[in-house]
Amino acid sequence: MPPARRILLPGGGWLNIHEQSGIGPPILLLHGFTDCAHSYRLILPYLKGRHVVIPDLRGHGQSARTSISGFDDFCRDLEVMATELRLEQATVVGHSMGALIAVLLTARACLSVSSLVTLSGSLAPASAALAQVRAQFSALPHPLPIDHPFIDDWYACQRPVPEAFLQPLRRSCVDMRPEDWASCLGMLQVADLREAARQVGVSSLVIGGDADPLFPESHQIALASALPKAQRLNLTGVGHNPHWEVASDVANTLLKFEAEAQQVKIGNRAEAVIARL
């Protein structure tokens, strides 16, 4: 992983961030519920030479265990971080819960975003599958042993993923406070970001796996339909974690989409200049 450091937040607490130096517009990678920045470790080799920022969201990884009252908390933290790092024209990528945060962050328009990519995202995640996860979490012992059978199920993938890669994610999960689990799952159960998605003005790419048990294809279709300038990619035989299961495909697709979005933006600027002449 790239070097880590802390960004202090107003009112106390901090974000632990990993930042890789490089050229081009920054790529901001947002992990999902219970995970941490390590979630993107497998795609980093394909982003070599690029400026990449990967935070641990509040309550996760090595970031502060501060209260989580809503998705706006995550967005405000990230906006402070972006100001501190002077991020401009970022490509924002979010996985699962991180995808919801990415959509809302982009819609808020307090951060300079050039394009948006969601991995296994949703706008209205409430479902029987999510309710089952919430019930399972509420019944878990605390502290939770890292070898608890639930952890094996939680990190199960449709395609093989190295166990050595999963170990830091398992640790991130069991180190979370029960109240943070409950807050995040409660937020996901009632979230409805369809109106926020309609406010997203940048080019967007919606990536999902056709074997995702949590946010299946219907969620990806609804997400792509709500975003005004969206493309959609459905990955065959891939589950809820495409950036783990087919890391090279996701990274290469991300870079291609980002380059195309930049060209469209440049073209739009040129047309606007011509129109003013």
Image (cartoon, helix red, strand yellow):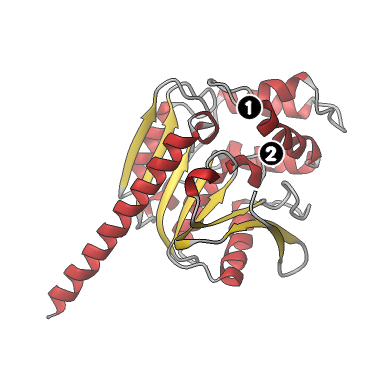
Residue drawn at (50%, 32%), measured in percent from left and top? 242
Q: Earlier in the sequence, mark 1 or mark 2?
A: 2
- The amino acid type, in three-letter code, at marker 1 is Pro
**Gap between marks 1 and 2 measured at Cα:** 18 Å
**Relative image position of residue 192 (x, y in whole percent):** 50, 43
Q: Are marks 1 and 2 in contact (CB under 8 Å)?
A: no
**Relative image position of residue 104 (x, y in whole percent):** 50, 53
- The amino acid type, in three-letter code, at marker 2 is Thr
**Relative image position of residue 183 (x, y in whole percent):** 71, 43
Q: Which residue is mark 2?
A: 34
Q: Residues within 10 Å of mark 2 (few under 14, many from 20)?
A: many
Residue 137 vertical placement versus 179 (above, below): above
Residue 62 appears left or right of 204? right
**Relative image position of residue 275 (x, y in whole percent):** 13, 74
Q: Nearer the viewer, residue 210 or 137?
A: 210
Residue 255 appears left or right of 191? left
Q: Which of the 4 image quarters holds residue 145? A: top right
Give the secondary structure at mark 2.
loop
Residue 210 vertical placement versus 191 (above, below): above
Residue 162: mark in rendering: 1
Q: Nearer the viewer, residue 265 or 201?
A: 265
Give the secondary structure at mark 1.
loop
Q: Which of the 4 image quarters holds residue 76? A: bottom right
